[in-house]
């Protein structure tokens, strides 16, 4: 089945070049991180916005291996930018990217039926190749038996096992790379025209896919045994979860529970942080003389950045649900459930994953659209991604809901504050679908792209994985608080403090500052939607990052306070100075408000120009102003003034 070939390095000390090839979500990047650690470089491929990850591995014997993490691909018959990049590199068609010395085909051991198709296509290239069965621990727990010797014989390549999430999970692969056989690597014997078939026409490519699937089934029958019981259990669950009616009810109930928990469960840890911030503010006031430095610490840092930090528990509870649903195997099923709904507005379930990512942050959501095959579908998904309620909005919503929505139960069961938060998330989703529907009317081809994806087996979420995911999200949030949010808060404190009040002034000093003067100018524009000059000031730095709006309000109201008012109690301050109509109007504004600068920059990179980012900013501003205007006027008419 195999023949021997010698790999000749360009120099005696040249590192071996290997490329990790695999389907999306097979654990390839986790394995790459395990192999290379901190010794990696991340950049973009020339001319495109697809990430290029390369790292260096030094084995125990001192062998140097240069590792390239190729973009995830389902097939070398490329249907997306990511797949085209991967195809060109493994075939030596990309300038500046030499053909890898070894192709390391990374597969999810629990889903070989899907993963082996790419392996067979890669084998047709005739390059030295090795198969890595990743997630072998999960496969063993599920009772999946893989005869590695039989699989190696059928494929004509070595077969190794790894666990990308364990510290020593890549040991077998590293030992193989470190072995003496590196200069005598196996090349699979393939038909002379095998590689040429990858350039076949669409019809020939479809026939090749059919032949490949038949070959995959034959190999799996000889080398892999999957327990029937586990499949039957999954099928029984899917009969309910994927039901066109009950499935949507379960999805809605799950999301509703998630937003209830964000308020109900987070109250205790949130109160601890609030008490801690208040204690620090009192400590600073008690031990520092009155002056600019004390004002910077209490009115700037603690009232601003500290006021955002108190929402960390709510963000972590939100991500706890998202990570648990993803780890359990439920989220891909949610994509299938919503495929028909999204098809009514010209999209497919493929848009679900980027839009779901946008609930964390719109930047990775925009980048995730690269997996969408058709440009028009991808563009519409990019344009509506900012309408998904990202986690940066949560501090703003939490502040306003806690201050103006009473904490009481509805129908004796539901938390009213959680119901309002759920309604705000739904408003963003409905608005996104409405924009997509309008875009569909402007298209000549309105056929939705069919969704094809492998459904993972159900499994209990990993406690370790959940803990690591929450830790990662907490670090990101704290870095934002200590980085951009703190920097903008300090800048806003300076603009709100200088120049100082003139002699004999009767109003708070901030009224005479640069920020106060800017707020008065902007108040003319935002007064029709119920915003005062303090809100106008907070909206400007809020373009840098959504959470900054809360810290900005904390700083502005701290400097606006007189007498012995406590600056850290922002909720109490706005409750006494805003009407309910104003609070509802601001909530409506943040459903549609233009994204932060980093998101605008990401859209510019993905669309290669300023046309679509400016269009996005324009339509979001228009929708935000219109929604706030209607909300404010209706609330006033109903007595919310």
Image (cartoon, rainbow, N blue to C red):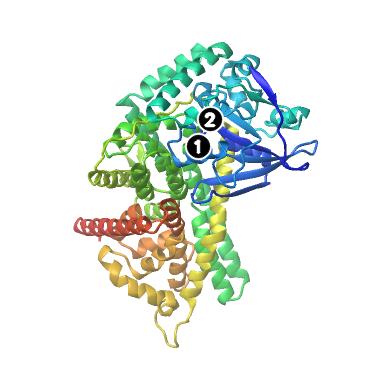
Q: Position of residue 83 (x, y in %)?
A: 48, 37
Q: Position of residue 233 (x, y in %)?
A: 46, 16
- Left or right: residue 172 compared with residue 394: right
Residue at 62% across / 35% down in the picture? 31
252 over 481 or under it: above or below: above
Q: Is residue 265 visible?
A: no
499 over 360 or under it: above or below: below
Residue at 36% across / 60% down in the picture? 575
241 over 538 or under it: above or below: above
Q: Position of residue 222 (x, y in %)?
A: 56, 11
What separation in Å lies between label 1 and label 2 (alpha carbons)? Answer: 8 Å
Question: Which residue is at the front of the view, 79 or 397?
Answer: 79
Q: Is residue 474 visible?
A: yes
- In the rendered image, which quarter contains the N terminus? top right
- Left or right: residue 354 compared with residue 100: left
Residue at 48% across / 39% down in the picture? 84
Count of marks, rendered view? 2
Residue 510: quarter of image: bottom left
- Assign a secondary structure to mark 1: helix
Residue at numbered disc 2: 461
- Label 1 close to label 2 by CB (< 8 Å): yes
Residue furthest to the bottom:
503
Residue at 78% across / 41% down in the picture? 12
- In the rendered image, which quarter contains the C terminus? bottom left
- Assign a secondary structure to mark 2: loop
Question: Which residue is at the front of the view, 627 or 20?
Answer: 20
Residue 147: quarter of image: top right
Residue at numbered disc 1: 323
């Amino acid at each position: 089945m195999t023949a021997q070939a010698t790999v000749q390095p360009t120099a005696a000390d040249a590192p071996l070049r290997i490329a990790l090839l695999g389907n999306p979500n097979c654990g390839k990047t986790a394995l790459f991180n395990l192999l290379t650690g901190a010794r990696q470089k991340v950049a973009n491929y020339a001319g495109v916005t697809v990430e290029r990850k390369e790292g260096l591995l030094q084995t125990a014997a001192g062998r140097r291996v240069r590792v390239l993490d190729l973009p995830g691909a389902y097939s070398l018959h490329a249907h997306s930018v990511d797949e085209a990049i991967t195809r060109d590199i493994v075939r030596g068609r990309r300038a500046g990217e030499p053909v890898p010395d070894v192709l390391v085909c990374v597969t999810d051991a629990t889903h070989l039926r899907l993963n082996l198709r790419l392996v067979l296509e890669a084998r047709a290239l005739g390059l030295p190749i090795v198969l890595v069965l990743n997630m072998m621990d999960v496969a063993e727990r599920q009772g999946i038996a893989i005869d590695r010797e039989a699989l190696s014989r059928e494929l004509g390549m070595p077969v190794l096992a790894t666990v990308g999430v364990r510290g020593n999970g890549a040991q077998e692969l590293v030992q193989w790379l470190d072995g003496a056989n590196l200069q005598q690597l196996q090349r699979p014997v393939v038909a002379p025209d095998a590689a040429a078939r990858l350039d076949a026409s669409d019809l020939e490519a479809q026939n090749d896919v059919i032949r490949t699937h038949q070959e995959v089934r034959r190999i799996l029958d000889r080398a892999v045994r999957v327990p029937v019981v586990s499949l039957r259990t999954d099928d029984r669950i899917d009969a309910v979860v994927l039901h066109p009616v009950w499935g949507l009810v379960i999805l809605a109930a799950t999301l509703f529970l998630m937003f209830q928990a964000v308020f109900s469960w987070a109250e205790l840890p949130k109160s601890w942080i609030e008490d801690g911030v208040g204690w620090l503010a009192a400590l600073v006031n008690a031990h520092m003389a009155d002056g600019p430095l004390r004002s910077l610490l209490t009115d700037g840092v603690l009232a601003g950045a500290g006021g955002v930090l108190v929402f960390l528990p709510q963000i972590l509870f939100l991500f706890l649900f998202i990570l648990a649903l993803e780890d359990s195997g439920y989220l891909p099923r949610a994509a299938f459930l919503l495929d028909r709904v999204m098809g009514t507005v010209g999209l497919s379930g493929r848009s679900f994953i980027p839009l779901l990512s946008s609930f964390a942050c719109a930047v990775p959501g925009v980048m995730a659209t690269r997996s969408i095959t058709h440009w028009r579908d991808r563009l519409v998904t990019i344009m509506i991604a900012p309408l998904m309620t990202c986690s940066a909005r949560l501090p703003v919503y939490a502040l306003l809901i806690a201050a103006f929505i009473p904490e009481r139960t509805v129908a004796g069961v539901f938390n009213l504050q959680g119901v309002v938060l759920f309604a705000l998330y739904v408003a963003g989703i409905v608005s996104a679908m409405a924009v997509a529907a309008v875009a569909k009317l402007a298209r000549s081809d309105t056929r939705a792209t069919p969704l094809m994806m492998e459904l993972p087996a159900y499994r209990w979420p990993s406690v370790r994985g959940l803990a690591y995911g929450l830790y990662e999200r907490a670090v990101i949030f704290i870095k934002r608080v200590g980085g951009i949010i703190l920097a903008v808060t300090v800048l806003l404190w300076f603009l709100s403090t200088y120049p100082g009040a003139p002699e004999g002034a009767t109003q708070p000093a901030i009224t005479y500052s640069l920020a106060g003067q800017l707020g008065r100018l902007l108040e003319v524009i935002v007064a029709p939607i119920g915003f005062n000059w303090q809100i106008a000031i907070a909206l400007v730095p809020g373009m840098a990052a959504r959470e900054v709006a809360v810290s900005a309000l904390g700083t502005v109201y701290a400097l606006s306070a007189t007498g012995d008012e406590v600056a850290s109690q922002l909720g109490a301050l706005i409750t006494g100075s805003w009407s309910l109509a104003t609070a509802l109007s601001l909530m409506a504004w943040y459903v549609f408000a233009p994204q932060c600068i980093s998101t605008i920059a990401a859209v510019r990179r993905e669309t290669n120009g300023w046309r679509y980012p400016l269009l996005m900013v324009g339509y979001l501003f228009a929708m935000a102003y219109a929604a706030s205007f209607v909300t404010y006027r209706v609330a006033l008419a109903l007595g919310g003034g």
